[in-house]
Amino acid sequence: QALYNLLMAFLNPGDEVLIPAPYWVSYPDMVRLAGAEPVFVPTSGKSGFKVTVEALARARTPKTTLLIINSPSNPTGCHHTQAELDAIAEWALSRDIFILSDEIYDQLVYEPAEPASMAGWWERKPEMVGIVNGLAKSFSMTGWRLGYCLAHPDLIKAMAKLQGQSTSNVCSFVQKAAVAALTGPFDAVESMRRAFARRRDLALGIIRTWDRAVCPTPQGAFYLFPDLSGYFTPDAPDSTALCAKIMDTTGVVTVPGAAFGDDACLRLSYALDDSSLEEALTLLYGAITG
């Protein structure tokens, strides 16, 4: 909702928004609801799905007003280094392009990668940077439905007006829970991060034994985004059909890459226990090779 409110408050009809692909499924439609036009910037699994300044420059037009960055990323797990984020920020801000940084997975970064953020750029130019975060992922509070935004006070006021006419406020006890989570010890977060890192490595080890699968190593979040186009068949010629085949034959649920802007891939979550993860991948492989 913070993402939606910011886009609605900031964008004007006809604006263009740069969105690196693959992207979270809601970004393009939220941009369109604000009357603007999404412009997708392709990335490649060969580079870990990282967007570059050069790719952004090729996609930019005189109508470009905003850039959405999601690091670590859903669906790919791509995580930009601080130096990479700094280069992107310098490029965007020097061209008066607002940066909307979705950092919902910021606590789920795996060694040797290090956390990185656009927060320093907000301090330098608060009127041109907005940072969105929440407690659903890093604190495993998905059902609490609480996020927050760091932006210039004038933009926050505009967002609050929109919020007041839609869903109003977050209930008070959830706000207190958020304060407790953010100010308390992060032991549970660290334990969860270690568990996710182990499951990532477990899943990667299995998938990389599949001769027609290509899967970059995600450095954050809890998703794998393997290219499984080598397993497309006449009865499952794309990611949507392959996901349906897997679910129908095994009961394992995956998400088609087409929803995220890359039809060669499937999104797999490793946010489950180790034995279930191994079982699911065994069933999945049987489905795509059967």
Image (tube, grey):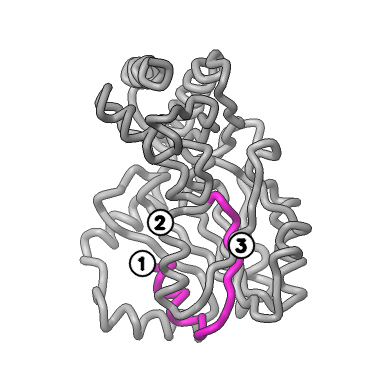
Q: Residue flagged by tag 3: what amino acid is it?
A: Ala
Q: Which residues are magenta?
A: 1-22
Quadrant into which the N terminus falls:
bottom left
The label shown at residue 134 is 2
Q: What's the residue at 34%, 17% (across, down)?
A: 283
Tag 3 secondary structure: helix
Q: Looking at the image, is mark 3 or mark 1 nearer the viewer?
A: 1
Residue 36 is situated, as x and y percent measured from the top left of the image, at: 50, 77
10 Å crowding of disc 1: few (<14), some (14-19), many (20+): some
Quadrant in the picture for residue 247: top left
Q: Residue flagged by tag 1: what amino acid is it?
A: Gln
Tag 1 secondary structure: loop
Q: What's the residue at 45%, 27% (across, down)?
A: 233
In-front residue for pair 31/116: 31
For mark 3, what is the residue? 119
Residue 269 is situated, as x and y percent measured from the top left of the image, at: 40, 34
For mark 1, what is the residue? 1
10 Å crowding of disc 2: few (<14), some (14-19), many (20+): many
Q: Earlier in the sequence, mark 1 or mark 2?
A: 1
Residue 218 is situated, as x and y percent measured from the top left of the image, at: 57, 35
Q: Looking at the image, is mark 1 or mark 2 nearer the viewer?
A: 1
Q: What's the residue at 78%, 58% (across, down)?
A: 54
Q: Is 6 contained in the magenta span?
A: yes
